[in-house]
Amino acid sequence: MLWYGYYQKLPRIHRYTLGERIDFLFIELMEAIACASFSARHEKMPFLRVAIRKLDALKILLLVLWETKSLDTNKYGALSIPLEEVGRMLGGWLRGIETKTPAGK
């Protein structure tokens, strides 16, 4: 929801390029997390890896918006802190699955 408010105020030049891509990555990230949460343990790892990859791409594109001054420092910080927390949670979830799953699977 926080991103949606910022997306509306992005400069037009970035709203329909980087902004749309970031918006789409947020949706893909939520979809991958939902798929992982409703999958059996042995099926979760691919979804978690996709979610982590989408999150990393999202953070990079947000950094580009910040570097081009299309997103001010306060807004960038307000978005970055929860995304870092999500990254830690996804990483812990993936490590937990990897340690509980036998090596042969």
Image (spheres, rainbow, N blue to C red):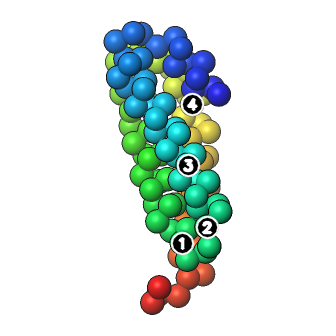
Q: Which mark is residue 55?
A: none
Of the residues shown, which amino acid type is indicated by label 4?
Answer: Leu
Give the crowd class for mark 3: few <14, some 14-19, many >=20 residues within 10 Å: some
- The residue indicated by pointer 3 is 31
Give the spatial CA distance, label 1 vs label 3.
15 Å
- The residue indicated by pointer 1 is 43
Of the residues shown, which amino acid type is indicated by label 1?
Answer: Glu
Are circles 1 and 3 on residues that touch, CB within 8 Å? no
Total marks shown come to 4
In the picture shown, does residue 103 fall above or below 28?
below
N-term-proximal mark, 3 vs 2: 3
Of the residues shown, which amino acid type is indicated by label 2?
Answer: Ser
In the picture shown, does residue 34 fall above or below 12?
below
Closer-to-camera residue (24/54): 24
- The residue indicated by pointer 4 is 79
N-term-proximal mark, 2 vs 4: 2
Mark 4 or mark 3: which is in front?
3
Give the spatial CA distance, label 2 vs label 4.
28 Å
Closer-to-camera residue (55/73): 55
Are circles 1 and 2 on residues that touch, CB within 8 Å? yes
Give the spatial CA distance, label 3 vs label 2.
12 Å
User: Which x, y percent locates residue 45?
Assistant: 51, 68
N-term-proximal mark, 1 vs 3: 3
Q: Quadrant of residue 22?
A: top left
Q: Is residue 74 left or right of residue 12?
A: right
Residue for point 54% across, 34% down? 80
